[in-house]
């Protein structure tokens, strides 16, 4: 399944959207070619859930970047300058916000 998904990504430069019939057809054909036809409905349901979650995270990232673009000065000020923190402090704050590191 992962190999088929990677092949889909390599071909289309994006993850498959299992809500789209074309993406499902292509992905399932790739799965069949990579011996994934042994998958059960539960496997496919899990993959669909993971794809929806990834899409939701991507949507949130777009919203965050849109809001950030609205408040950043247009004068070439960097995010670090605008926040008034070091690169290390900024990266640490991002990791904490993403739940990848504890404060």
Image: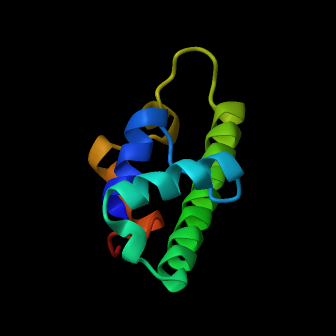
Q: Residue furthest top?
A: 75
Nearest the camera: 90 or 66? Answer: 66
x and y percentages locating residue 67 in the rendered image: 70, 42
> Does 12 sit above or below residue 64?
above
Residue shown at 54% from the left, 60% from the top:
54
Image position of 85 with respect to 41: above or below: above
Q: In the current view of this chain or complex, which residue is farthest to the left? A: 88
> Where does residue 32 sit, x and y in percent of width and height?
41, 60
Q: Residue at x 37, y 61 (%)?
A: 95
Position of 19 with respect to 93 (left or right) is right
Residue 76 placement (x, y as % from top left):
52, 16
Pick the front one: 33 or 79: 33
Please identify the quarter of the rendering in which residue 75 is found. Answer: top right
Q: Is residue 93 visible?
A: no
The quadrant of the rendering that contains the N terminus is: bottom left
Tell which of 33 and 50 is nearer to you. 33
Left or right of 68 in this view: 27:
left
Quarter placement of the C terminus: bottom left
Residue at the image point whose x is 61% and y is 40% from the top: 65
């Amino acid at each position: 399944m992962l190999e088929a998904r990677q092949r889909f990504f390599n071909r289309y430069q994006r993850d498959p959207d299992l809500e789209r019939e074309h993406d499902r057809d292509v992905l399932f054909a790739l799965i069949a070619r990579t011996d994934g036809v042994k998958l059960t409905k539960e496997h496919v349901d899990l993959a669909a859930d993971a794809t929806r979650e990834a899409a939701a995270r991507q949507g949130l990232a777009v919203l965050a970047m849109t809001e950030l673009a609205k408040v950043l000065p247009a004068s070439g000020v960097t995010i670090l300058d605008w926040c008034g923190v070091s690169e290390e402090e900024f990266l640490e704050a991002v990791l904490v916000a993403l739940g990848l590191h504890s404060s």
